[in-house]
Image: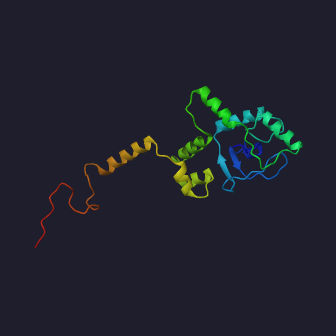
Amino acid sequence: MMHLTWADVDFLENRIRIVRKGDAGAQCEWEPKDHEGRLLPVPGDVMRLLTQFQAEAAEGCPYVFMPRWRWDYIQRARKARRWNDRRSLVNNLGRRLATLRKTAGVAKFTYHDLRRSCITNWERHLPIHVVRKLAGHSDIKTTQEYYLSVQEDDLEKARHVQSEILGDVLTDPLLTHFRPLLGSRPEPKES
């Protein structure tokens, strides 16, 4: 998120490119954790917000979520040769999020919590291999183990499916040790 630039936002196709950033003038070097680029579809409402952000963005700042004061600080540090491009672009977004959260009266959460929620929501509507790709995970096990959670309505859906499958029959005779249904007397063995 910190390294998202305006060049990454495709306003015509409503998507964002997650790509490696080389030493391209004003941008700092950065590479996605999985080393792979990807395209993320973006809803129209979010694109409208990004259009508003762009209208208010600092002149010449390539970064979407960087406030003017932070951009000016980085440029001054670069001119004075005190900025190392491997240095983090962290610009107090965490503090700003905490302030907004407290003002709104919302329980404590992190940006990574938002990522986990997004990935869980995708999984509810998309095939897991698509979710893995959108999340940028090289291994689907990462998506499954660390990012998906079982929701209360998932449990209710499972309960409903179980009721439908079982109906009035408590056991499936093909899956039990005894062929007759439980509760009925086994047939006597011949001697």
Q: Is residue 127 visible?
A: no
State the image quarter where residue 46 is shown: top right
Q: Position of residue 84 (x, y in %)?
A: 81, 48
State the image quarter where residue 115 is shown: top right
Q: Is residue 187 visible?
A: yes
Q: Is residue 67 above or below residue 14?
A: above
Question: How many labels, in total?
Answer: 0
Q: If the image is split into quadrants, where does the C terminus sit?
A: bottom left
Q: Left or right of 178: which side holds 156?
A: right
Q: Is residue 41 above or below residue 34?
A: above
Q: Position of residue 169 (x, y in %)?
A: 25, 52
Which residue is located at x 71 percent, y 49 percent? 17
Q: Position of residue 39 (x, y in %)?
A: 67, 50
Which residue is located at x 55 percent, y 42 percent? 117
Decide which of 47, 61 is in the foreground and name it.
61
Q: Is residue 106 above or below residue 163?
A: above
Q: Left or right of 138: which side holds 80?
A: right
Decide which of 78, 137 is in the foreground and name it.
78
State the image quarter where residue 98 is shown: top right
Q: Left or right of 141: which side holds 55?
A: right
Which residue is located at x 65 percent, y 29 percent? 99
Q: Left or right of 191: which side holds 113?
A: right
Q: If the image is split into quadrants, where does the N terminus sit?
A: top right
| Residue at the front extreme of this rendering | 82
State the scheme by which the image is colored.
Answer: rainbow
Q: Position of residue 23 (x, y in %)?
A: 82, 52
Which residue is located at x 88 percent, y 45 percent? 81
| Residue at the bottom extreme of this rendering | 191
| Residue at the left extreme of this rendering | 191
